[in-house]
Structure formats: C-alpha cells, structure tokens
Amino acid sequence: MGIREDVYFEGGPHIGDLITNILIGLTIVGLPLTVGAIVRALWLRYRITDRRISVMGGWMGRDRTDVIYSEIVKIVKIPRGIGLWGDMVITLRNGTRLEVRAIPKFREIYDYIEEKVIARNPTYVGAKK
C-alpha cells in the first residue's frame, strides 16, 4: 500500500483562459491561441499534493510529469486575466523547467508550493525571507 497524499488542488486550467482565448480567436490572428486554450481545457489537469506536483497533459492527456518539492530550486509566478488566474514556471535542480499554465487560485497555490519547497529544500532561495 502506498503512502497517503493529501490533495491541496486538483483540476484543470481556469475557465477564464478558455473564454478569453475564444474571444481573441474571433480574429484570424488569434486562432492559434484559441486552439491552444481548447486543448488545455480538454486535456490538461493539475494535481498538487503535500508530496508532489503532477501535471497531466499532452495529446488526450496521456503525458504525466511528477515533481517532488525537494527538487525545486526556483518558482516564478505570472498573473493573467486581471489576476484571476496565472502561470508558474518551476525550475528543478537539473535545470529542467515545468510550466503550469492558466492555474486557478495561483497565488494561494504558489504560497502552498513554496511552503512545501522551503520545508524540503534547504538550498531554496525564495521570494519570502
């Protein structure tokens, strides 16, 4: 039997990302953004627990990336949609970057992730001092 994980957040991208990009898609130039938002809405899912961050995505949601907090060395958050949702770029020890796009409640989720990273990675240099 596996170790129990407490789920903090589980879900897909913020609906505002899809709505905004559909409106932009009414112009020919915005069509690629609209297609990207539809694909994210259909197949992108996040699961943030007390042990890891999981991102399920790709074609038909078949790809999965798991990151444990002790591997994170940097987190950058970027507000989108007048601050209702946002993006995060998570940098790992080996230099790999994981993008978390259009996540709802991104400020609260960022604070939660940073708290877990600080507890598990003594070399983490975060925004909070």
Image (spheres, rainbow, N blue to C red):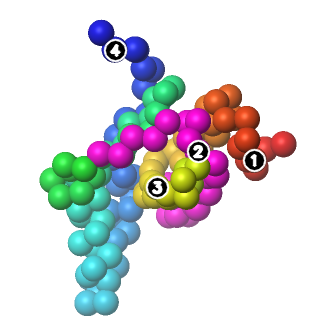
Which residue: 67% across, 35% down?
A: 121
Mark 2 burial class by Cα count in 10 Å: few <14, some 14-19, many 20+: many
Residue 41 painted magenta: no
- Where residue 35 appears, x then y in whole percent? 24, 72
Which residue: 25% across, 50% down?
A: 63
| Residue segment shown in magenta | 64-90
**Dominant secondary structure, magenta:** strand
Residue 70 painted magenta: yes
Helix, strand or loop status at disc 3: strand
Q: Give the residue at mark 3.
A: 98
Task: Determine if residue 129 is in view.
Answer: yes
The answer to whether residue 14 is above or below residue 80 is above
Nearer the N terminus, badge 4 or badge 1? 4
Q: For the residues marked 3 and 4, what is the alpha-carbon distance in whole angstroms?
A: 25 Å
Q: For the residues marked 2 and 3, what is the alpha-carbon distance in whole angstroms?
A: 10 Å
Which residue: 38% across, 62% down?
A: 17
Helix, strand or loop status at disc 4: loop
Nearer the N terminus, badge 1 or badge 3? 3
Q: If the image is split into quadrants, where does the C terminus sit? A: top right
Q: Nearer the viewer, residue 49 or 13?
A: 49
Q: If the image is split into quadrants, where does the N terminus sit? A: top left
Which residue type does callout 1 highlight?
A: Val
Which residue type does callout 4 highlight?
A: Gly
Mark 1 burial class by Cα count in 10 Å: few <14, some 14-19, many 20+: few
Q: Give the residue at mark 4.
A: 2
Q: Nearer the viewer, residue 37 or 71?
A: 71
